[in-house]
Amino acid sequence: MRFGRNLAKLRKQKGLTQERVAEKMEVSARYIQNLEAGDNFPTLPILAQLKGVLHCSWNELFEGCERVPK
């Protein structure tokens, strides 16, 4: 599984929209959409924010990911 797909799965499990996640993180909904589509990969500070917004562990955030992009 790719990071973006896992992110979308976690977000939906938590009952959050892309817009709500973006609002909580103070980023654009388009940015969240791009992360989920695999067009962007988040920086460590953004990953930490996602972890907080989704109330998940690092393992859950990266569960099933094939690899971390360079």
Image (spheres, rainbow, N blue to C red):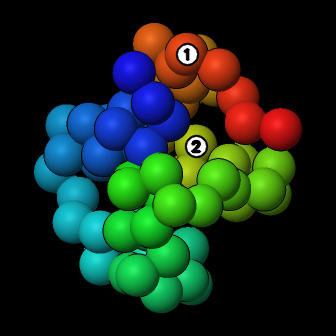
> In terms of depth relative to the viewer, which is nearer, 62 or 41?
41
Quick one: quadrant of the N terminus? Answer: top left
- Please tell me whether mark 1 sits on a helix, a strand or a loop: loop
Q: Residue at x 19, y 37 (%)?
A: 13
Q: Residue at x 70, y 28 (%)?
A: 68
Q: Which is more N-terminal, label 1 or label 2?
A: 2
Q: Is residue 24 visible in this depiction of the protein? A: no
Q: Residue at x 23, y 58 (%)?
A: 16
Horizontal arrangement in the rendering, residue 46 relative to residue 64 (left or right): right
Identify residue for label 1: 66
Horizontal arrangement in the rendering, residue 43 relative to residue 47 (left or right): right
Above or below, 6 against 15 in this view is: above
> In terms of depth relative to the viewer, which is nearer, 46 or 33?
33
Identify residue for label 2: 51
Residue 65 in the image: state x and y as whole percent: 52, 19
Q: Residue at x 83, y 38 (%)?
A: 70
Above or below, 22 against 13 in this view is: below
Horizontal arrangement in the rendering, residue 62 relative to residue 68 (left or right): left
* Amino acid residing under circle 1: Glu
